[in-house]
Amino acid sequence: MTWTDKRRQNVYWTVGGNYQRRYSGEGDGFDAAESGMIDRAFPKNRLVNFVAKNTQNVTNGKDMNAVARILALQYTKNTLYSERPGIKAMAKDSYKTRYRTLDFLNKRDLAQEIEMQYAAYRMGKPMSAGTFLEPLMRKLIAGDKLKSEGEFYEYLARLWREHFHVNPTLTFEVEKKIEVKDVPPPPEEAEPKKKRRQIVETKAEQIEDKDTEIIESAEFSGVIRDTSKVVESDASITRTRADNEARTLARVRKHYGKETLSPAKAKKIESTIATGLHQGMRLHVTKGNFENDMGARFFEDQILAQRQETEAIYEKDRHIYERSIFELREIIRKNLLDDSSQESVRAANGAIDTGLLWRHVILGDDRIFKKNSFEQENSFAVDILLDMSGSQQDRQAEVAIQGFLIAEALTQLRIPTRVMGFCNLFNYQIIRIFRDYKDDSKENREIFSYKASGSNRDGFALRYVFETMEEIESDTKVLIVLSDGMPNDLLSVGLDTGKGDVVDYEGEDAVYDTAAEVLQGKLKQRAVLGVFTGEDKELDQEKLIFGTDFVRIKDLERFSVVVGKYLKSVVERLQ
C-alpha cells in the first residue's frame, strides 16, 4: 500500500479529530495515527510548547525532545490501540522498519539510540541498552501508567532532571508550568466572543476530552468493538452485532445528519446494489438535518463554517460566476432543447400539394395539404454527483461552486435536476441530497453546504444513482460526476475485520469497479460526463473511468463553454 500525503493527512484527522490541523510528517498510516493521538492528548500544541520552552537553550535539547516523544507515545499507546484495533496490527512492522533504519547507521547519537531501544521494545525484541540508558528506558516504558496530562508533565520534568543536565532556570520554568496548568481562569477574565470557526475548534476540544467520543474522518475509520470477552451463544452474537450496528448508525447520524429513507426502502435498495465488492455496505441518505445534541452540533457547525467560506468566495467573484451560468444556460438551451426536428406531413389543411390532387379526385382523400410538424421536444433529467471525500479537502469551495453553476443553468431552463454528494464512514455509504428533481431553484444554494470528509466508494455511489434515476420520467437521463478519480475506502484500518464482511476498496480494483459502473450506466442509455477536480497525477485514473467523456476545468472563465460542449457531445451520442 502506498501512503500519499493525502492519505496520511486523512489518518491524522481521523485519530486526532481536529480538521484544522495539517500533518507534515512522513512514513505510513501508523506514523500519522501516532501523531494524531499525541496531538489529541495534548491539544493546542501544549506538549510542543512545553518541550520547546524548556529545551531551547540547552545543548542536549535533541535528546530531551526524544525522551518527551517516546514518553508521549507510551502514554497514548493504550488509548490508540483500544480505539483502533487495525492500528495495533500495524505496530510491529512499523517499529521493525524504524529499528532497522536506526540500526543501519554507523554512528548514532543519544536521541537515535533512545528511539532504537524503544523500537526494539515495541517489536518485542530485548533491549540492549547500557547501564546509562537502561534505567531511563524502564521509566519511559512505565509511562503507559500515567493517568492525566498534568501527571505526564510532572513525570517528564522529573526524567529530565534525573537523566540530563538542565539549567536551574529552565527547571523552574518546568515546575511553574505544571503548577499553573490546570488552574481555571478567573471569571472576570472571560474570553471575548469568538468567530464561527473558532467556536468550532473550541467545541472540538470539548468533544475530544470525552472518552466516548471519537471524531472520524477521511479514508480511515473503524467501529470500536470489544473482542476481549468470549461470546458463548448465537443470541449473544446477534445482540452484540445489533449493539455495534446501533452505535455505528448513531455516529453516522452525528456526522452527517438524520436519514431520510425509511429502513424498509433503504434495505430494498441495499439488497439490489450491495453486491460483489460492495457486499455488506449500508445506505445513509440524508438532507443534512442534525439531531439536537452537542456532538451533532459540532459537525453541523463545521459544515456551516465551510458554507460561509464558500459563499464568501462566490460573492467575491459573483459577476464572473453569473456570466458563466448565463453562458452555460444558453449553450444547453440552443444545442439540447431547441434542436427539435421538423418534417412535412400530409394534412387536411395547410399549403396545397398539387402532386396529391389525384388522391382527392380518385380516392376522396382530403389530406392533400402539407404542413410542418415538429417532433415533441425531448425531455431531460440531470443528476449531479459530487465527490465529498477527504481528498477534496483542499478544493471544497471550488467543487461546490462548480456544482452550483451547473445546477443553476439547468434549473433556470426548468430541467429536473438532482444534486448529491457522496462519501463513506465505516460501512455506510453517505448520500447527501442537496436538491431533488422537483425542488425550487432556491435549494441550489444548499450545494454550498458541501463539506469534504470520509472515504469514497465511487462504484457503490454510482450504483445508487443509476438505481434511483428510475424515479424520474424523462427521455434522456444525464449524470455529471465531479470527482478526483481516486476511489478509496479502507475499512480494515481501524475496523475489527474479523467480524466485518465489507472488503477494502482501493487501488486498481476500485478504479476498474468505478469504470465498470460508468459503463453499465451507458449501457442503460444514461449519458455520463465526468468533471475532473483532481491533480495531474490522477488524470490517468480519470481517463480509465470515464474514457473520453470527461473535462478538466483549469480556467473558470471557460467553464461554461467547456462543460456545455462536452455535455452536448455525450447527449448526442446517446440519442
Image (cartoon, rainbow, N blue to C red):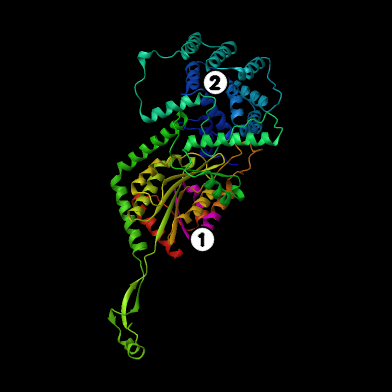
- Residue 437 in sight here: yes
Residue bearing the label numbered 2? 65
Mark 2 and 1 residues: CB-CB less than 8 Å, in contact? no
Drawn side of residue 416 relative to residue 178, left or right = left
Residue 508 rendering spot, x and y as whole percentages? 58, 49
- Residue 323 is marked as none
Depth check, front residue: 60 or 193 = 193
Depth check, front residue: 496 or 73 = 496
Q: Amino acid at mark 1?
A: Lys
Would residue 525 be counted in the magenta stretch?
yes
The local crowd at label 2, few if under 14, some if 14 to 19, many if 20 or more residues have their Cα within 10 Å, is some
The magenta-colored residue range is 516-543
Element class at badge 2: helix
Drawn side of residue 449 relative to residue 127, left or right = left
Depth check, front residue: 396 or 91 = 396
Residue at the spot x=29%, y=79% of the render? 349
Identify whether 66 is placed above or below 433: above
Residue 132 found in image quarter: top right
Residue 7 rendering spot, x and y as whole percentages? 53, 39
Drawn side of residue 295 relative to residue 346, left or right = right
Q: Amino acid at mark 2?
A: Asn
Q: CA distance from mark 2 to mark 1?
A: 61 Å
Residue 93 found in image quarter: top right
The local crowd at label 1, few if under 14, some if 14 to 19, many if 20 or more residues have their Cα within 10 Å, is few
- Residue 457 in sight here: no
